[in-house]
Image: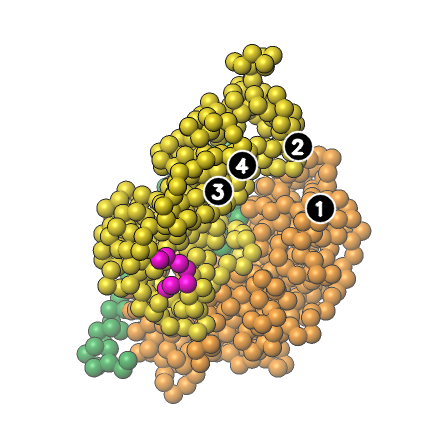
């Protein structure tokens, strides 16, 4: 119910503000809700506020898991002569 | 300066006032010293209320459009060139060669003359580049608050090419649906100004005159069924209009839709769908499937059609749904837009 | 877009779909509720139903803050603009919600009320600072994701000693709504929940543990993208097959067990629990919503102005209540798609783009029409 997307922090500004970049679109947002954000971190943005730092290692792990699950399931399906 | 005017029009610092629309000396001076500076051709030089046009030798096509865009200036253009391109395109998508334009202006009292001069210069440039002259026009002034700076209505006249029959009612099951390029640029260029988004490189409106692209397309594939430019309401609205008009359904492929990265990102930030965002320099083409390759080749050969793609196909559907195969592999419909697309937080 | 596009990849989706097909037991049905409206939207918008095994059904839940906003609260907002001459600042989502007297915020604006769309609470504060002679009221809506930004706005207003700024507070709580669904006597049979993505970044995964423990229903917190939703459903299938009922986290890149403590602390500083609050479709739920604490009373529009809340019943034909509780599907509502459409929404499920009815109408109604 809450539209929020990850974007990379490209600049830190006064008063808890920062600029994030999403594919060339820059927006000023507030870091008032998060701690210790550095330029280069990815944060999740909702209504002009960063809600959380994105854990990029976990992101990569999750994608790797998807790949692995998919590979296993698809190869099992093809060797079993597949249910549709 | 014509001796009947007591002093030159102060284009740099002056403002539109009610006398400029009254039909008297002030209005004549506005036309002479601002409009005619830029918009000059033999027709306008006659100085008559109307323009005598050459015998068209063919079926006439006429189209008209009011332009009320706000803001008046945006990356990639302004209301001036937008109004020229928009009406040229409306005539051209009918399969006609645009020949002449008429332009009427409603000016708000207090609007800066310097900006009006920029708009008129931009219109003139666009008309010259397109080789479609503005042959007649009109100006009125309304009180402060009754217009958004400037409203422009353009009307265009053209001649239908022989043997061409393009209409929204002609799409048939099996026909190919083509899109001339990437989407969402004009609408997001405007929206970004409104929503105070900043950019590395601004999103630039794609406003363009498409008649030459269309000419090349018709040369290659005179058997085209439909052409339409997806303006307000975006590609989604245009496809739904054609589907309803022709009494058919459509299936398009999300993977075939091109969106420039900053446009996609801006849409993502605001919760908007690029399929519903306005374009001002793109074309949707429907043609018999055996001619799809030739049509695509003709589009690709032109600078305005380099990123053209095959979107999908028309099929029989009594409910006239436009369906889309999503990039994920599932299906959804691309419905009519309801109301204005608003940014969302949820 | 990094960390977005990768989670929309068709190839990986096919792999997860195959994993679900392999693991779903063909002898039984699985019924999972996705609580969050954003997930409802994602499921419809990407056509995820096509990729799930046929015996897995998704029930749409009430996690759409616009959908659960009672008519009477919109009426209050409109009255603040019209009767108190306040500038009402609101997120765009609320503008078309139908209120009393056939009004919406958008219609009231057309009739002259000063209602302005904002993207962020900072915009609302800027409006207040730019208009010191006018009252500015911010219509605060949303679950726990959206509440911390409002908390920051109130604290900022206090620090700036703004005299003309207040909020009409409609912030609601996710666990309370989940509890209402699970304890409803005529409750819909559910095998598990897909937990909200961004609410969970704030509150953490811990608050869902009572649901798994007390009701024996697994909860898997899912990220916002379609692959996240698919993987979460896959994890729920596994739990059901194993007879487990625990809280699992698919959205590990953004959600921890504890959540965002700083955001939670700011919310606790500014807000307190209301005894009860009326939810559209779910009735009155105790301890389910927030109001400003006493030290911030001057920023509470309900205490600052006389604009009492009057409950308004839903249109009799509207099935939003049952739909929000998952008892009916949009297509089961008598007026779905005929009288009630996105152009003419009768109930709030049709207004918000993530409301179950709007999502189904806009993206999915071709499925029944074919049947």
Q: Residues within 10 Å of mark 4 (few under 14, many from 20)?
A: some
Residue B104 badge:
4
Residue C209 magenta-highlighted? no
Same chain assignment for discs 1 and 2? no
Q: Is residue C160 left or right of residue C308?
A: left
Same chain assignment for discs 3 and 1? no
**Comparing labels 2 and 3, the label whose residue is closer to the camera:** 3
State if disc 4 and disc 1 touch (CB < 8 Å). no
Residue C365 badge:
none
Q: CA distance from mark 3 to mark 1?
A: 34 Å
Q: Disc 3: which chain? A: B
Same chain assignment for discs 4 and 3? yes
Instruction: Name which of mark 2 and mark 4 comes first in the sequence.
Output: 4
- Mark 1: secondary structure: loop
Q: Residues within 10 Å of mark 3 (few under 14, many from 20)?
A: many
Q: Which residues are magenta?
A: B165-171
Q: CA distance from mark 1 to mark 4?
A: 30 Å
- Of all chains in the rendering, the one displayed in green is A
Residue B155 badge:
3
**Comparing labels 3 and 1, the label whose residue is closer to the camera:** 3
Q: x and y percent of residue C33 in the render?
A: 50, 72
Q: Colour of chain B?
A: yellow
**Residue B175 appearing in the image:** yes
Q: Residues within 10 Å of mark 1 (few under 14, many from 20)?
A: few
Residue C112 badge:
1
Predominant secondary structure, magenta span: loop
Residue in the foreground of this view, choosing between C325 and C81: C81
Residue found 31% across the figure and 68% down from its top = B174
């Amino acid at each position: 119910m809450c539209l929020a997307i990850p974007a990379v922090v490209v600049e830190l500004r006064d008063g808890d503000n920062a600029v994030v970049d999403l594919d060339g679109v820059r927006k000023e947002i507030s870091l008032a809700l998060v701690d210790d954000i550095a330029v280069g971190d990815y944060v999740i943005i909702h209504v002009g506020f960063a809600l959380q730092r994105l854990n990029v290692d976990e992101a990569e792990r999750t994608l790797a898991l998807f790949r692995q699950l998919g590979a296993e399931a698809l190869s099992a399906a093809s060797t079993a002569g597949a249910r549709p | 300066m014509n001796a009947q005017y007591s002093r030159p029009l102060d284009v740099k610092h002056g403002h539109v006032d009610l006398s400029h629309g009254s039909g008297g000396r002030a209005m004549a001076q506005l036309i002479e010293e601002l409009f005619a500076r830029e918009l000059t051709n033999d027709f306008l030089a006659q100085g008559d209320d109307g323009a005598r046009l050459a015998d068209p030798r063919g079926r006439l096509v006429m189209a008209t459009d009011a332009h009320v865009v706000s803001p008046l200036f945006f990356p990639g253009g302004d209301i001036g060139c937008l109004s020229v391109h928009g009406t040229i395109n409306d005539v051209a998508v009918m399969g006609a060669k645009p020949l002449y334009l008429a332009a009427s202006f409603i000016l708000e009292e207090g609007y800066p003359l310097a900006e009006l001069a920029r708009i008129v210069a931009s219109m003139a440039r666009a008309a010259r580049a397109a080789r479609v002259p503005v042959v007649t026009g009109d100006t009125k002034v309304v009180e402060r608050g009754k217009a958004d700076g400037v409203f422009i209505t353009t009307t265009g006249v053209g001649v239908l090419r022989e043997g061409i029959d393009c209409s929204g009612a002609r799409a048939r099951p099996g026909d190919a649906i083509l899109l001339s390029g990437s989407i969402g640029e004009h609408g997001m260029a405007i929206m970004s100004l409104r929503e105070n988004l900043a950019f590395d490189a601004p999103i630039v409106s794609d406003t363009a005159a498409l008649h030459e692209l269309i000419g090349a397309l018709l040369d290659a594939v005179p058997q085209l069924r439909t052409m339409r430019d997806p303006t307000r309401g975006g590609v989604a609205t245009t496809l739904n209009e054609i589907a309803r008009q022709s009494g058919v359904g459509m299936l398009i492929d999300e993977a075939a839709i091109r969106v420039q990265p900053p446009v996609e990102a801006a849409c993502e930030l605001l919760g908007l769908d690029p399929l519903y965002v306005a374009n001002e320099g793109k074309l949707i083409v429907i043609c018999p499937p055996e001619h799809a390759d030739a049509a695509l080749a003709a589009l690709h050969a032109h600078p305005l059609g380099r990123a053209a793609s095959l979107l999908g196909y028309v099929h029989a559907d009594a409910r006239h749904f436009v369906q889309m195969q999503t990039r994920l592999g599932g299906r959804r419909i691309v419905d009519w837009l309801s109301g204005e697309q608003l940014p969302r937080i949820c | 877009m990094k960390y977005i596009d990768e989670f929309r990849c068709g190839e990986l989706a096919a792999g997860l779909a195959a994993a679900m097909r392999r693991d779903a037991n063909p002898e039984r049905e699985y019924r999972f509720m996705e609580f969050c409206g954003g997930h409802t939207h994602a499921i419809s918008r990407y056509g995820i139903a096509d990729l799930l095994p046929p015996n897995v059904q998704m029930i749409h839940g009430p996690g759409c803050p616009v959908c659960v906003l009672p008519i009477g609260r919109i009426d209050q907002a409109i009255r603040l603009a019209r009767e108190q001459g306040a500038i009402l600042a609101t997120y765009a989502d609320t503008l078309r919600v139908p209120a009393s007297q056939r009004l919406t915020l958008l219609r009231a604006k057309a009739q002259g009320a000063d209602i302005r769309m904002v993207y962020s609470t900072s915009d609302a504060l800027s409006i207040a600072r730019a208009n010191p002679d006018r009252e500015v009221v911010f219509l605060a809506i949303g679950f726990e994701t959206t509440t911390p930004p409002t908390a920051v706005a109130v604290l900022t207003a206090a620090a700036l000693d703004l005299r003309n700024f207040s909020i009409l507070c409609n912030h609601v709580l996710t666990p309370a709504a989940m509890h209402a669904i699970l304890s409803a006597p005529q409750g819909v049979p559910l095998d598990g929940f897909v937990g909200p993505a961004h609410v969970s970044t704030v509150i953490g995964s811990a608050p869902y543990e009572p649901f798994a423990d007390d009701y024996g229903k697994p909860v898997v917190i899912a990220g916002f993208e379609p692959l996240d939703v698919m993987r979460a459903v896959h994890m729920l299938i596994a739990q059901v097959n194993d007879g487990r009922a625990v809280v699992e986290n698919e959205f590990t890149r953004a959600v921890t067990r504890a959540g965002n403590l700083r955001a939670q602390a700011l919310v606790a500083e500014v807000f307190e629990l209301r005894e009860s609050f009326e939810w559209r479709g779910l009735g009155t739920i105790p301890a389910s919503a927030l109001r400003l604490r006493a030290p911030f009373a001057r920023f509470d529009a309900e205490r600052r102005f006389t604009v009492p809340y009057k409950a308004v019943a839903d249109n009799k034909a509207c099935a939003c209540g049952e739909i929000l509780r998952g008892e009916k599907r949009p297509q089961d509502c008598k007026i779905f798609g005929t009288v009630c459409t996105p152009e003419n929404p009768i109930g709030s499920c049709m207004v918000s783009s993530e409301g179950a009815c709007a999502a189904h109408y806009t993206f999915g109604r071709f499925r029944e029409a074919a049947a």
